[in-house]
């Protein structure tokens, strides 16, 4: 029985091999097939390169949009955006560890030439003395991000009020909730020159220093 | 000289090594070597399951899939088994599109076949006639076995249980025995 099966297997195997050799691709068909898949292989590589280029362009565009519209970037650079060359000094008011801090920064752009430096120094001195003499100062809110930027009416001082201080003012009800960009504001200072309140003034009033 | 040396080196490698090399490099000469090794095997398998035009078409499509799917090739398996799996799936997809898929399995008879027509006296022609009349799934298992695949590999290629393959092969053999003899 087993011998008979082996005979059948051998017979079928031989018949199959003959059948296969009678039904194979001709040399011409094989060459055609090889050429076709070579072309496809090449195209496959080109497609990969194309995909890579598209991806690269997409990443570049994404980065560009990110740089242009990223809010954080915008906020961090608000000082540059709102900077007006006539402001010779920038006052920064902020709270750090519950301590009130006030920094007065000098405008760098004014120091590029000696003449500009002299002028800036003069303006700085004048503005500082004027600031000290006022216990109430008016200005226009020119940028409202996390930090607020208020330009004094005489355009000599740019006051930066940091978010920390704004929060405290809000807690003490010393900040008008309806304030929006472009509003005319009045500062209330204490004896130390610290901002204790920001009040909205009627926009019809003239901006007088 | 360098090119012929390269081809000689490639000729010495088995299909699995060649496919692993091709998956990494995508080089045409390696692909050509694989085609030379297995194009006829694949074409004959597809031909036994369809017709000349479809076999040629599916053969091309299968090799194009080898190019596309080369990254998915697992070097631990047999390349020929992988190629035949891709080829079979491509063929079945095409038959589905042509609405010929269901018919293949509807006519599948696990019982013995009875051929009423007169078979040729020439044994080789008789074998061809018998092979063509064998039900699709039995023919598939038989051809794959003749191609050197084990029961397990046939089961994996056709997504069937080993026992099912054994049964199909038993029916196929008994059918050939009936008309060709031992």
Image: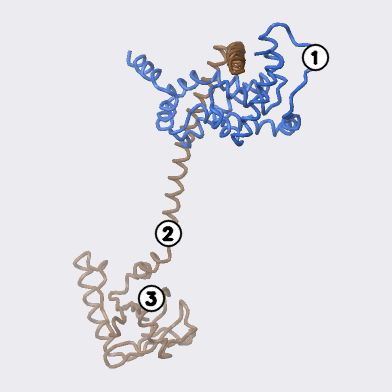
CA–CA distance between discs 1 and 3?
96 Å
Which chain is brown in the picture?
A
The residue nearer to you, when weighing A20 against A4, is: A4
Question: Foreground mark, 1 or 3?
Answer: 1
Residue A147 is marked as 3
Q: Tell me the quarter of the picture where residue A63 sits.
A: bottom left
Contact check, label 3 and label 2, Cβ < 8 Å? no
Q: Along the horizontal axis of the image, is A139 left or right of B104?
A: left
Cβ atoms at labels 1 and 3 below 8 Å apart = no
Quadrant of the frame with the N terminus of chain B:
top left
Q: Indicate the position of residue B10 as horizontal and vertical percent values.
A: 39, 20
Colouring chosen for the image of the structure: by chain
Q: Chain of mark 1?
A: B
- Give the drawing colour for chain B: blue
Q: How much space separates mark 3 and mark 2, taking CA atoms?
A: 19 Å
Where residue B45 sits: x, y (%)?
60, 22
Identify the residue position indicated by label 2 in the image.
Answer: A68
Residue topped by disc 1: B117
Query: What chain does mark 2 sit on?
Result: A
Residue in view at x 31 percent, y 82 percent: A95
């Amino acid at each position: 029985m087993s011998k008979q099966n082996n005979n059948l297997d051998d017979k079928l195997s031989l018949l199959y091999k003959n059948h296969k050799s009678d039904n194979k691709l001709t040399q011409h068909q094989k060459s055609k097939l090889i050429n076709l898949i070579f072309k496809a292989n090449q195209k496959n590589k080109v497609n990969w390169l194309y995909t890579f280029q598209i991806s690269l362009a997409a990443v570049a565009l994404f980065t560009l949009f990110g740089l242009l519209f990223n809010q954080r970037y915008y906020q961090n650079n608000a000082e540059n955006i709102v900077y007006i060359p006539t402001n010779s000094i920038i006052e920064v008011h902020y709270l750090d560890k519950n301590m009130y801090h006030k920094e007065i920064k000098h405008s760098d752009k004014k120091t590029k030439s000696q003449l500009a430096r002299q002028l800036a120094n003069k303006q700085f001195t004048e503005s500082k003395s004027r600031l000290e003499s006022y216990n109430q100062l008016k200005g226009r809110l020119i940028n409202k991000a996390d930090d607020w930027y208020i330009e004094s009416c005489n355009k000599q001082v740019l006051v930066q009020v940091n978010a920390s201080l704004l929060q405290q003012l809000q807690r003490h009800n010393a900040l008008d909730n309806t304030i929006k960009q472009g509003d005319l504001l009045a500062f209330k200072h204490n004896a130390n020159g610290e901002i204790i309140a920001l009040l909205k003034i009627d926009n019809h009033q003239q901006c007088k220093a | 000289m360098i090119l012929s040396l390269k081809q000689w080196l490639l000729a010495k490698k088995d299909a699995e090594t060649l496919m692993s090399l091709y998956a990494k490099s995508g080089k045409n000469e390696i692909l050509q070597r694989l085609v030379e090794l297995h194009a006829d095997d694949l074409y004959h398998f597809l031909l036994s399951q369809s017709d000349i035009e479809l076999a040629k078409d599916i053969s091309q499509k299968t090799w194009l899939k080898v190019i596309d799917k080369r990254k998915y090739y697992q070097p631990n398996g047999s390349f020929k088994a992988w190629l035949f799996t891709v080829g079979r799936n491509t063929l079945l997809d095409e038959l589905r599109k042509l609405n010929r898929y269901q018919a293949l399995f509807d006519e599948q008879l696990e019982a013995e076949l009875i051929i009423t027509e007169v078979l040729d006296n020439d044994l080789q022609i008789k074998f061809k006639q018998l092979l063509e009349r064998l039900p699709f799934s039995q023919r598939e298992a038989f051809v794959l076995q003749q191609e050197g695949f084990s029961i397990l590999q046939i089961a994996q290629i056709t997504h069937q249980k080993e026992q099912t393959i054994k049964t199909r092969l038993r029916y196929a053999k008994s059918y050939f025995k009936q008309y060709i003899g031992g």
